[in-house]
Image (cartoon, rainbow, N blue to C red):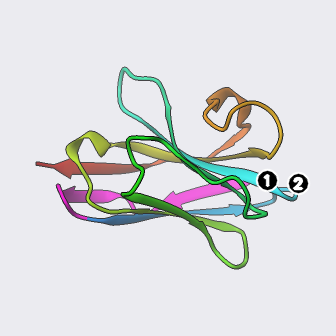
């Protein structure tokens, strides 16, 4: 059984930083794709950053390029999202998700079959 547990959310002022973590276990495919999504009430879930566990094909949403960095721990079971220069528009619930590396676009939330419970990020101006 796949389990994903996010942590690291919180409240910061604009310009601040946070690091989110997503601990995974029980995934049988290798390599696989791990992706951070975010969602605010009334809006669709947005893909933020993604990488494959074989180190290939790292992607970022245009809105976070140059500010966010996605990385995988050496054990390849913890995904990080380092978020710098945070803006109020970054306020959202952040989720990590996994799927196989092949298939549709990394931004296609419907293609991910395992999700964490989410961690809230709030950025004040």
Residue 91 visible here: no
* Mark 2 lies on residue: 29
Instruction: Using the image, determine if residue 115 lies above or below residue 5.
Output: above
Q: Residues within 10 Å of mark 2 (few under 14, many from 20)?
A: few
**Drawn side of residue 74 relative to residue 41, left or right:** right
> Where does the magenta region start and end?
1-16
Check disc 2 and report its element: helix, strand or loop.
Answer: loop
Q: Residue 109's quadrant in the figure?
A: top right
Give the Cα separation between the discs numbered 1 and 2: 6 Å
Residue 5 visible here: yes
Instruction: Using the image, determine if residue 19 lies above or below residue 29.
Output: below
Q: How many marks do you count on the picture?
A: 2
Q: Check contact, mark 1 vs mark 2: CB within 8 A.
A: yes
Check disc 1 and report its element: helix, strand or loop.
Answer: strand
- For the point 60% across and 50% down, the residue is 50
Identify the disc placed on residue 79: none
- For the point 21% across and 59% down, the residue is 12
Q: Would residue 83 be counted in the magenta stretch?
A: no
Residue 27 horizontal/vertical position (percent):
82, 56
Residue 72 horizontal/vertical position (percent):
63, 68
Residue 20 horizontal/vertical position (percent):
45, 62
Instruction: Using the image, determine if residue 37 lies above or below residue 23.
Output: above
* Mark 1 lies on residue: 32
Is 39 in front, or is 48? 48
Q: Residue 88's quadrant in the figure?
A: top left
């Amino acid at each position: 059984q796949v389990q994903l547990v996010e942590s690291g959310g919180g409240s910061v002022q604009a310009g601040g930083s946070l690091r989110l973590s997503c601990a995974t276990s029980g995934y049988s495919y290798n390599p696989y794709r791990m992706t951070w999504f975010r969602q605010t009430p009334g809006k669709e879930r947005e893909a933020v950053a993604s990488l494959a566990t074989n180190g290939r094909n790292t992607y970022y949403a245009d809105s976070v390029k140059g500010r966010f960095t996605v990385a995988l721990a050496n054990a390849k079971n913890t995904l990080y999202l380092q978020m710098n220069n945070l803006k109020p528009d970054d306020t959202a619930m952040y989720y990590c998700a996994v799927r196989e590396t092949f298939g549709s676009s990394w931004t296609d939330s419907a293609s991910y079959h395992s999700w964490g419970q989410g961690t809230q990020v709030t950025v004040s101006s």
